[in-house]
Amino acid sequence: MTLHLIAAFVVTLALFAVDSAASSPANRHYNAGDDVPLFVNKVGPFRNPSETYEFYELPFCRPDRVIQTKQTLGEVLNGDRLANALYDLKFLEVKSRATLCLKKLTQGDIRRFREVILNDYYFQMYYDDLPLWGFIGKTEEQSWVLEDGNKLKFYLFKHVNFDVLYNGDQVIEINALGDPNDAVDITDDAAELDVDFTYSVSWYETSTVYQNRMARYTRASLLSVHKKIHWFSFVNSAVILLLLMGLLIAFFFRRLRNDLRMSSSGDDEGEDKEVGWKYVHGDVFRHPQNMSLFCAFLATGAQLLTMAFLLFVLAFVGTLYPYNRGALCTACVMVYALTSVVGGYISASFHSQFEATGWGKTVFLTGILYLGPFFITMSILNTVAVSYGATAGLPFGTIMVVLLICVFLAFPLLILSGIIGYTFRSEFQPPSAPKRHPREIPKLGWYRKTLPQMLLAGLLPSSAVALELHSLYTTFWGYKITTLPAILFVSFVILCLLTAILSIGMTYIQLSVEDHQWWWRTVLRGGSPAIFMFLYSVYFFSRSSMSGILQTSFFFGYTACLCYGIFLILGAVSFCASFVFVCRIYRAVKNE
């Protein structure tokens, strides 16, 4: 089995290396007149980022033989479908109104173009691994037309201007713009229409170096208005973090020291009034119900947390960058598979500290707790995409590759690390042994129940990162990069710190009223900010121009998977912080 895992690990690293190399730009140099690779990719409505179709599904000029490039795993997952094009953009070769093709548009072609122009369709291409976009046509409103007439006129762009910037012998930037002054009117249903599609190519020298050519795609986040928003977000988050830390230090720790002082002095009257958490010392370390599910929850959260930090590392070292075709999708698949080691080890080792049997069930639940709902969601969305004929629909071969990675890499690593965690488990010695019968919990007010506390624990952290959350949604479901990895990382750290601080404070309050059922409560309280994040996505969608069954299902489906992962991460962070805190205070009581 060890040889099998080593072979699977090597194959995975090789696949990731090949995938990254295929999608990352090489440091290419050209001589005048050299061919520069240009591929058409996809088309889609501007308001629906997930609704994209293959380029040649529209009646464009097409080669005699359409050849799709060899797709990497990440490109297919990202919905890219690159194919050869008739455009010929040789390095430093200027062209003026070169003929692309003379095409006869049928009545059905004209109707199809009118439909896509009405929905603001755009096209995407790649030139020397640089993405470029352009609109297919435009509409003009005729205010003088009678009420029964068609108030919109439809124009199809038949000429495209390519403006290319170069530095020495390298391509730095490219833009494509349909010429609105050279468009054909397709408002009326003509039987047939002959259209001469043309294009022009202009070259301009720039001082931008090749290493900085991708910086323009993150330029939106560097505008002054975005800088002010990000600074305000950081100040807002820092103020909330400092206030909570000050409250925790000034109030809870001071009260905790008083509790410990009264315990050492034997002041029973003061203990009855102030130290309610000491009465539950025989119940606080009694493990909760559904222990296997609880440990799987913690292990999956720890695995996703490790995965998130590794993805940030890849972004910081430059492996992940904007519009690196499919690199993020590939990294997510591979890193999740490799971090199964974390999930398997933590689930088995933590479970074995409290129960001698049942760790196998815990490891199994760890493998399906996140992956199961994600695969179900992805299957439903893939069915919708295939029914629409969208590029987001995954081919059968890609689905099999992902399943093989899970079966032959993720699950074996999960099982092996679970065996290691069980074999090398450490015995947990609680500061106070659990009593045989649990102590009865006093009747508590409604505001001390789980749901009100989830509301409070979720509102503060989510409000602290609300502005960055908006930027994150805008980046995921838009066409501009409105945030940067460093900003996201700091926001993520602040979110985890706020969750941990609130968890410690609310756990202390819960134990002070002799409520010893804190295990599951800390997990649910900690993960509650993810619920607010999903609720904000509903507001974000309502304010956007996205529409249609395909885009709506993709938005809420994948946003729900993202928020569910954050719920698991923050729940694990919350419990770990509270667990360390509870062990410390009861160990301090035992020592005194």
Image (cartoon, helix red, strand yellow):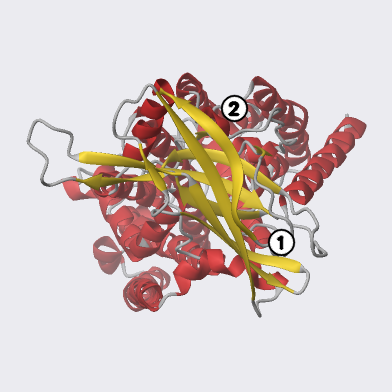
Badge 1 or badge 2: first in the primary sequence = 1
110 displayed left or right of 56: left
Across and down, in percent, residue 568 comes to 49, 44
- Which residue corresponds to the image point at 45% horizontal and 53% vertical from the top-left? 479
Residue position for label 1: 93
Up the image or down, 368 lies above or below 493; here it is: above
Q: Nearer the viewer, mark 1 or mark 2?
A: 1
Residue position for label 2: 394
585 displayed left or right of 425: left
Q: Nearer the viewer, residue 401 or 350?
A: 401
Across and down, in percent, residue 118 comes to 31, 38
Q: Nearer the viewer, residue 158 or 384?
A: 158
User: Total marks drawn?
Assistant: 2
- Which residue corresponds to the image point at 12% horizontal and 47% vertical from the top-left? 143
In this view, the residue farthest toward the left is: 147
Quadrant of the drawing holding the N terminus: top right
Q: Is residue 341 visible?
A: yes
Across and down, in percent, residue 93 comes to 71, 61
25 displayed left or right of 135: right
The amino acid type of the residue labelled 1 equals Glu
| Label 1 Cα crowd, 10 Å radius (few <14 / some 14-19 / many 20+) | some
Q: Nearer the viewer, residue 485 or 204?
A: 204
| Label 2 Cα crowd, 10 Å radius (few <14 / some 14-19 / many 20+) | many
Up the image or down, 135 lies above or below 408; here it is: below
- Which residue corresponds to the image point at 25% horizontal and 49% vertical from the top-left? 543
CA distance for labels 1 and 2: 38 Å
The amino acid type of the residue labelled 2 equals Leu
Q: Is residue 592 visible?
A: no
Which type of secondary structure does the marked residue at label 2 adopt?
A: loop
